[in-house]
Image: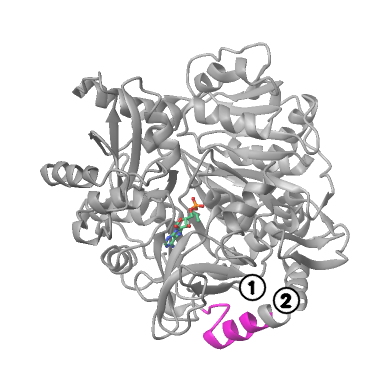
Amino acid sequence: MNFAQRTTRLDQEKYQEMYQRSITDPEGFWSEQAEELLVWDTKWDTVFTHDVEQGRVRWFDGGTLNVSYNCIDRHVEAGMGARVAYYWEGNEGQRIDITYQQLLEEVSRFANLLKSRGVTKGDRVCIYMPMIPEAVYAMLACARIGAVHTVVFGGFSAEALQSRIHDAACVAVITADYVKRGPKQNPLQANVDAILPDCPTVHTTVVVQIGSEPLVLGDTSVDYRAEIMKQDVVCEPESMEAEDPLFILYTSGSTGKPKGVLHTTGGYLLYAAMTHRYTFDYQPDDVYWCAADVGWITGHTYMVYGPLCNGATSVLFEGVPTYPDASRYWEVIDKYSVTTFYSTPTAIRMLMGQGDEFVTKTSRQSLQILGTVGEPINPEAWHWYHDVVGRGQCYIVDTWWQTETGGHALTPIPGTVDPKPGAAMQPFFGIQPVIVDADGNELTGECEGILLLKGSWPGQMRDLFNDHERYLEVYFSQYPGYYLPGDGVRRDADGHLWISGRIDDVMNISGRLIGTAEVESALVLHPDIVEAAAVTIPHPVKGCSMCVFVCPTASATITEETYVELGDLVKKQVGSFARPDQIVAVAALPKTRSGKIMRRIVRKIANKEYDALGDVSTLMNPESVTDLIEIVKKL
Ligand code: WT7
């Protein structure tokens, strides 16, 4: 079937009507949605309250519900127990079909296992897992007993894992012995074991065996496969307050350590379910595949909570797009007759570079809706996605959102608007985009500026875990009364929105946010390095690549080996995905008179925009600019 033959939930008129109502009558609009999409134990008293000054929002106060019940039990109770929740596709092409009934049993057992180890409501549990079904069971098991999960992407290093466990004061860690990615098998449990002595809050580690060697377990570790079958298959879901925390997910910031974004129960689940339903025009016959990792917000909202709440059938994929070859995605699409596929510009560009043959030898006749997320998509990649992957017959949703927004904030919706290649187009229900100049003056009509969001929506983050001050400072202090996402945006003559990219010191490499501060503080740990500045330059596949400039100490001799050591330091402190693409030693970096590195100038020079530097005479060391330009010209 083609998208053109699909009867979509919405058309432009219906979208407009619903959008207007979501703004003019938010209480009425969201109560109806909350009644329709979720099952509540007790109904709420207040739809929402918004303290603009404190950036405090509360949704569905007084209401109680359980997220795991909403994602599983209610579908089983409605007679859908035999429906497939997940087709798990293993790295090597193994297949496991998991029905809602089986999901209920697995999650209940896991919940009982956690309980038997003393994990209770409100406890934080760290999940450091590969893309195996147990990762999803673990998240839902936490939700079932009211524990708060914090999933850490398996590509993060032991150090990065430790700082998150420490910040969230986790009592338990759920992990696996290995993670399999294409031809590689990397250790995972070893990273946990390495830091456990420095994690005093952790009393339990659960290890899921996927490798062939027997597990080596410490005193506080549990062998998941040995213990799980001893657990009862019934576990009563804990009734939670709508504003009880559901999870913490760390995301990179402009400065300092990653931020623990906190999401709560009722509003988040409603927004996850609703965006999944409308943005992907989800209908019961669909087979939906979000090719993300549970370690990112996309994995939370669009692999787990949104689709399960809607009773969807999803593909859960362990592998990578190029293993065994670059046809893998398209073969999986044919294998399960996927109708809706959600990926990233980086993956699309990378596969585009492998040639059309890998795509055209597969059928992809089932595909109707294609999604993209994580970074701006260039029109060339958009057209390739549309014409080659989608046979020119699919609707493309370019979804702009963030860990903090909980779900899609700007996106075309199938059946409503004709998407323009590279544009996030229009706001989702309840989202009120405002564009301002640097001084905060609101811009109207065709314009380009800083994106702000006015008001509140149910999926909005509630706080930074244990750091309300930073929350206010980062998101609400620069433009009081508005939420500041940190992206630039353009509005065209038709009123459609185009995201241009980050406007702060956060780098977006292959759709993954990395703070300049995280990389720089890793580099200066090297005894030969005193200072560092990390910037991005455009890259044909990754969107942006990372270039860092380092200043050695006076006595240091920088050799090829030093560069390798520096790359390794970033790998150790953050993870291999954050390793710089280019490291360049320089005598000095441009600084303000107060001694702050002018990253903006470094970025311009790295991008060879020598004429756009502005007035550099007020710098503490204007000569550093000339030196830097000379070095960059020779690269
Ligand atoms: C940042 C948020 C949202 C899930 C994955 C990333 C960039 C995200 C788009 C898009 C242009 C995008 C923004 C945003 N971004 N989607 N469709 N077009 N840019 O979540 O790690 O919290 O990153 O990703 O810069 O602020 P995240």
Q: Quadrant for residue 370, please give it.
A: bottom left
- Using a 10 Å C-alpha cutoff, classify the residue at mark 1 as few (fewer than 14 neighbours), some (14 to 19) or many (20 or more): many
Residue 81, can we see it? Answer: no
Amino acid under disc 1: Gly
Q: Which residues are magenta?
A: 7-21
Q: Main secondary structure of the magenta part?
A: helix
Magenta region includes residue 394: no
Residue 476, above or below 86? below
Nearer the observer, 249 or 32: 249
In the displayed image of the protein, which residue is found farthest to the left?
634
Q: Quadrant for residue 134, please give it.
A: top right
Q: Which mark is residue 216?
A: none
The C terminus: image quadrant = top left
Query: In what element is the residue under mark 1?
Result: loop
Where's residue 462, x and y in %? 69, 54
Label 1 sits on residue: 430
Label 2 sits on residue: 26
Cβ atoms at labels 2 and 1 below 8 Å apart: yes
